[in-house]
Image: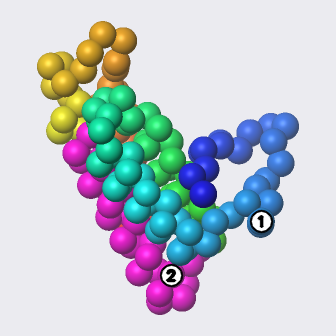
């Protein structure tokens, strides 16, 4: 299940336990994002915001669960490493103006912040 990130705010209830994805589901979601979306036919600049938001939701679900079983920790580390690679690749590719078309933008500082957050999770 590919789930959109939702920031907790006033007026929003906490996530229901049934809405939190299992570590295995999070890994399969990450597989889909890397293989089918980033590795798909669309340019990175087109899919970047979608993947950026969904990887943030993956990190959020892992954070809420505070995984402790060894196999779940290994899945979390695998996902965090791939999320970090996505942010590094995005910073490398999308900071070059020639890789962006009219109407496309890229915020290097937000990308760096998400990379830092991902590395802290590791």
Residue 9 horizontal side relative to residue 109, left or right: right
Q: Is residue 82 above or below residue 53?
A: below
Predominant secondary structure in magenta? helix
11 or 98: which is nearer to us?
98
Extent of the magenta region: 66-90
Point 37% across, 36% down: residue: 48
Q: Which mark is residue 18?
A: 1
Mark 2 and mark 1 lie on one chain; the one further toward the N terminus is: 1
Mark 2: few/some/many CA within 10 Å (<14, 14-19, 20+)? some
- The reply to whether the C-beta atoms of the residues labelled 2 and 1 are less than 8 Å apart is no
Q: Does 25 appear above or below 32?
A: below
Query: Would residue 112 be seen by someone viewing this image from the given angle?
Result: no
Pointer 1 local density, CA inside 10 Å: few below 14, some 14–19, many at least 20: few
Residue 114 lies within the magenta run: no
In this view, which residue lies farthest toward the top? Answer: 102
Disc 2 designates what residue? 72
Where's residue 95, x and y in %? 20, 28
Residue 18 in picture, x, y percent from top left: 77, 65
SS of the residue under disc 1: helix
Q: Under tag 2, what secondary structure?
A: helix
């Amino acid at each position: 299940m590919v789930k959109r990130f939702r920031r907790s705010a006033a007026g929003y209830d906490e996530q229901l336990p049934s809405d939190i994805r299992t570590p295995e589901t999070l890994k399969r979601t990450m597989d889909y994002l890397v293989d089918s979306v980033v590795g798909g036919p669309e340019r990175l600049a087109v899919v970047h915001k979608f993947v950026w938001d969904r990887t943030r939701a993956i990190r959020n679900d892992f954070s809420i669960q505070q995984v402790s079983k060894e196999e779940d920790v290994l899945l979390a580390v695998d996902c965090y490493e791939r999320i970090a690679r996505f942010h590094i690749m995005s910073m490398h590719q999308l900071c070059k103006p020639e890789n962006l078309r009219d109407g496309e933008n890229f915020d290097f500082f937000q990308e760096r912040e998400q990379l830092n957050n991902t590395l802290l999770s590791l």
